[in-house]
Image: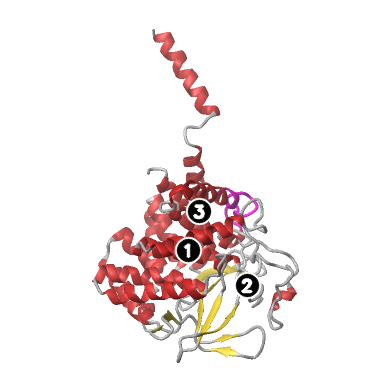
Amino acid sequence: MKRFLILSLIFVFALTAFYPVSNKDSFIENNLNIATQQLKYMVVEANKIPNHFPKTIDKSGKMIGFDLYDWTSGFFPGNLWMAAEYSKDKVLKENAIEWSTKLYPLQNFTEHHDLGFMTYCSLGNAYRITGNKMYRDILIQSAKSLSTRYNKTTKSIKSWNRFDSWNNNKSYNFPVIIDNLMNLELLFFASKETGDTSFKHIAVQHALTAMKYQIRPDYSSFHVVCYDTITGKVIARETAQGYSDNSTWARGQAWGIYGFTMAYRETKDIRFLKTAIGMADWFLNAKTLPADKIPFWDFNIGEAGYTPGPRSKTYMVTTKLRDASAAAITASALFELANYAGNKSANYKENAIAILHSLATDTYRSKLGENGNFLLKHSVGSIPHGAEIDAPLIYADYYFLEALIRYNKSLSK
């Protein structure tokens, strides 16, 4: 009997050696462990540039950052919080607290719409993990500041103070970009925490307006919609960071999938779910989506009928570059959308996993200590502006981490 038990144990061990009990768990664990170590390296370098938050690298490969008022300032602290939560690393948590503290002045900032990115991706994670009411109070004040950019006539939150067209010398004073959907989560949070429904009202109205004017009938998307504040009517639909006004900018489509999925979670309004599903299907079924599911920076680069504005620097880049940031955002969004999409849920989760596996290859994921200590390579900031072309970006890392964590949590459901 004893000999039989020994042989049985040997047989089971042999099976698990060839067929691991959980390949998915080991994939997630491996990538999160690498991310944790890479972030430790990044902290060391980030401390060398006081009052600047990591964003990308320069031409020599050295990490560069921007001050707290750049729209990306909240992502590095957010990355530290997510990594600290996963790893239970006390030093990472201390660094997360330190870098989050630097963002406190943003609670009264009203100069652009990105307070959701700046405060919720950082202090939102901080409050969720620690329960510290100080973070909550700062977030609520941030939501008040963001609300000042809402216009009752346009039923939208003003994104930038001005948008200069790539096509001519015309400027628009009330532009709304699809990215703005992401900042609504801060407003939904504030409404739940305070019981003040005005925050939720603004978020819902903005999302409904974006759904009506920013999303095309086929569920592709415009990047920028400009409004007349007297009549509330649309006066222009253009692009700021995409290939052309009528093209579909990859990261913009990703923001839409994520934003409308989040809006459905917070409201249970079926219109938002339908839009999120439509946008996700458009992304995944696009004829120009490469086999590895990491999109080119725009879905219509070089196609007939799509012409960049004459003032855009798009003409200077002839290579069709990928955008890992758009892929990471989409993967994270699909993991959540899979919770609500009925018979499409399995497909969305399957595609999210496939995107993560592509991002985790040597093609897109950095080796430890390389690439300015960013996690991912090959993202695109804005080719029309000539900025961050084929470079690592801190927000690509954020959504890659978030997608891995959402994947991990999905395994326990």
Give the left or right position of residue 123, taking residue 164 as reference: left
The answer to whether 217 appears left or right of 141 in the picture is right
Whether residue 380 sits left or right of residue 402 in the image: it is right
Q: Is residue 50 visible in this depiction of the protein?
A: no
What residue is pinned by disc 2?
242
Q: Are marks 2 and 3 in contact (CB under 8 Å)?
A: no
Q: Amino acid at mark 1?
A: Thr
- Residue, x 27% and y 61% (percent of image)? 131
Outermost residue toward the top in this view: 1
In the picture of the structure, the residue carrying the numbered disc 3 is 35
Q: Which residue appears at 48% of the width and 63% of the height?
A: 275
Dividing the image into 4 quarters, which one contains the C terminus? top left
Q: Which residues are magenta?
A: 357-370
Mark 3: which amino acid?
A: Ala
Query: For the residue marked with disc 2, what is the amino acid?
Result: Gly
**x and y percentages locating residue 44 in the rendered image:** 50, 63
Residue 125 locus on image (x, y percent): 37, 62
